[in-house]
Amino acid sequence: MELLNDLPSLRAWVAARELARERIGFVPTMGALHAGHLSLVRQARLRCDRVVASIFVNPTQFGPNEDFARYPRTLEADQALLAGEGCDALFLPDAGMIYPEGFTTRVSVGSLGEDLCGRSRPGHFDGVALVVTILFHLVRPAAAFFGLKDYQQFVVIRRLARDLAMPVEVVGLPTVREADGLAMSSRNRYLAPGERERAASLSRALLAARERLRAGERDPAVLEEEALRVLREGGVTEVEYVAVREAETLAPMERVSGEPVMLLAARVGRARLIDNMVLSLA
Ligand code: AMP
């Protein structure tokens, strides 16, 4: 796996791929990699000629009281995992390469970024949109791969690419889970043993809501209440939101129809965890 530590080496790598008419697949990450990230690399390899991953803990998507400084950084292990998965190259920018002296441009995804997770993380999705825009311009991928675990992020990036006519296919891939259903996340490292058990009730809450939907319930408020009940029973009391939304646009719905998604966010110990499930009506 080639290590691309600066912009000239990234540019040279991209130019060589383009000269060879190879399709570049791109997997942007913040590192502390786990099987969820690796599933993106695997799919990228299947669908593209060459795969480049990036590791960049992006300062503009963290709020002032968030975990930027203590976000887990495990570069050596990450490199080994990516190489083992057959990733062709790893781009490792530092903040000065992405946001050089004099940087002033902003990207906003408007109200899409102010809802759900955006309520407690103002500016977060604009920061995501900004870094993804810059990374797409540098890497020029044919396709970029994102996890549906971060469902709102996926919707935001797909919208961004469409709105700004970016020539990239934005691919969303299923959430990889632990055996007890907990969605894999770099932030699961923050969980102490008792908290780790409580965290499993996030996915159980989604499954319980799906059961109620399958039994005929169509009132979003009732489905949300069912999820909240399971969270409470599982000892998760600091719930930020539970919401049933239209899967494509994240618009609220009065009666569940079409393709709904249930999204939730909760604090367990010092970890802020999110999860979601597309609730197929079929
Ligand atoms: P992050 O390093 O947290 O920024 O995540 C990088 C990419 O990996 C994002 O597209 C995430 O949605 C994706 N990802 C994170 N966790 C999972 C998971 N459990 N399953 C699938 N994709 C994931």
Image: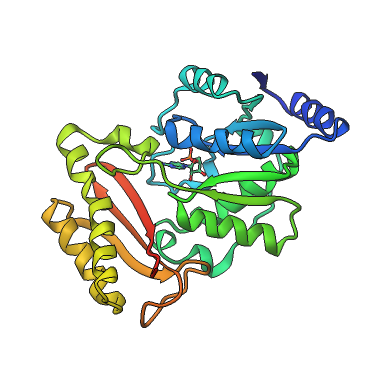
| Residue 117 appears in the picture as rendered | yes
Q: Is residue 268 above or below residue 77?
A: below
Q: Nearer the viewer, residue 122 or 77?
A: 77
- Which residue appears farthest toward the bottom when viewing the image? 254
| Residue 100 appears in the picture as rendered | no
x and y percentages locating residue 233 in the rendered image: 11, 56
Horizontal side, residue 68 vs residue 106: left or right: left
Where is residue 126, by image quadrant? bottom right
**Callout count:** 0
- Which residue appears farthest toward the front when viewing the image? 282
x and y percentages locating residue 161 in the rendered image: 67, 57
Where is residue 54, by image quadrant? top right
Please, which colouring scheme is shown?
rainbow
Q: Nearer the viewer, residue 50 or 70?
A: 50
Q: Quadrant of the N terminus?
A: top right
Residue at horizontal 26 percent and vertical 41 percent from the top: 270
x and y percentages locating residue 108 in the rendered image: 61, 61
Horizontal side, residue 82 vs residue 14: left or right: left
Residue at horizontal 31 percent and vertical 75 percent from the top: 220
Residue at horizontal 47 percent and vertical 51 percent from the top: 148
Q: Quadrant of the C terminus?
A: bottom left
Horizontal side, residue 137 vs residue 219: left or right: right
Residue at horizontal 71 percent and vertical 50 percent from the top: 168
Q: Nearer the viewer, residue 19 or 92?
A: 19
x and y percentages locating residue 155 in the rendered image: 54, 59
Q: Is residue 181 above or below residue 119?
A: above
